[in-house]
């Protein structure tokens, strides 16, 4: 996984995770990366500082960064199995941004339910029309998709989802 600092044509900056640099290029070309502020899909990589891995970090020492073990995608996954996020109180602004992301995915992508992994493979292998999808998948399914080079991201878990 690689995190890029990205900037839209309006100058809004944000960060996005991708499987690799090729995935970034493909998603940009397909118009799948959009600015969370204005919705523009005309985005480019912004200037960013490199991450330097030290021996302490590689060995999991006290300065090692926290690693998000959830896998990433152009299609979205919703599942309490695949997304086991801890219950953390988020600032109101962040919670609203997560709501906006989720609404955007739900408005622009097709819900495929528990057939997410199957449909993602069909799209990846050109056996189904290319489109954004979301649905449910187990963590094992998401890992298998990742191993096949199929990008997928969990939808944000919102506070109201935990009720």
Image (cartoon, rainbow, N blue to C red):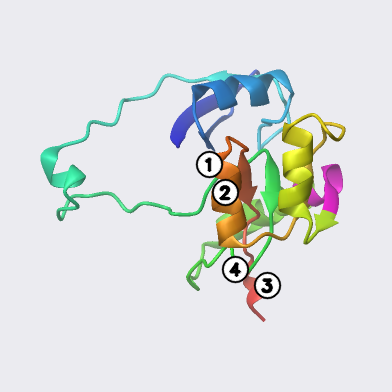
Where the N terminus falls, by quadrant?
A: top left
Q: What secondary structure is found at the residue carrying circle 4?
A: loop
Q: Nearer the viewer, mark 1 or mark 3?
A: 1
Q: State how far apart marks 3 and 2 are (Cα).
A: 26 Å
Q: Are marks 1 and 2 in contact (CB under 8 Å)?
A: yes
Q: State how far apart marks 4 and 3 are (Cα).
A: 13 Å
Q: Residue at x 80, y 29 (%)?
A: 126
Q: State how far apart marks 2 and 4 are (Cα).
A: 14 Å
Q: Residues within 10 Å of mark 1 (few under 14, many from 20)?
A: few
Between 67 and 102, the one lying in front of the other is: 67
Magenta range is 105-111
Residue corresponding to mark 1:
147
Residue 22 image-quadrant placement: top right
Residue corresponding to mark 4:
81
Residue corresponding to mark 3:
161
Q: Earlier in the sequence, mark 2 or mark 4?
A: 4
Q: Earlier in the sequence, mark 4 or mark 3?
A: 4
Between 131 and 107, the one lying in front of the other is: 131
Answer whether residue 107 is magenta in the image.
Answer: yes
Question: Does residue 126 sit above or below 84 in this rendering?
Answer: above
Q: State how far apart marks 4 and 1 are (Cα).
A: 18 Å
Name the mark on residue 144.
2
């Amino acid at each position: 996984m690689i995190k890029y600092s990205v900037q839209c044509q309006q100058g809004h900056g944000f960060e996005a995770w991708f499987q690799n640099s090729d995935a970034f290029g493909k998603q940009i070309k397909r118009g799948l990366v959009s600015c969370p502020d204005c919705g523009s899909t005309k985005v480019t990589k912004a200037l960013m500082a490199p991450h330097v891995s030290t021996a302490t970090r590689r060995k999991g020492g006290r300065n090692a960064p926290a690693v998000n073990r959830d896998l990433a995608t152009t299609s979205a996954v919703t599942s309490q199995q695949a997304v086991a996020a801890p219950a953390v109180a988020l600032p109101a602004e962040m919670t609203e941004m997560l709501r906006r992301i989720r609404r955007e995915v739900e408005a622009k992508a097709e819900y495929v339910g528990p057939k997410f992994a199957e449909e993602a493979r069909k799209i990846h292998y050109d056996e189904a029309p290319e489109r954004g999808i979301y649905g449910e998948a187990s963590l094992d399914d998401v890992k298998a998709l990742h191993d096949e080079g199929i990008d997928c991201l969990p939808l944000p878990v919102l506070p109201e989802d935990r009720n």
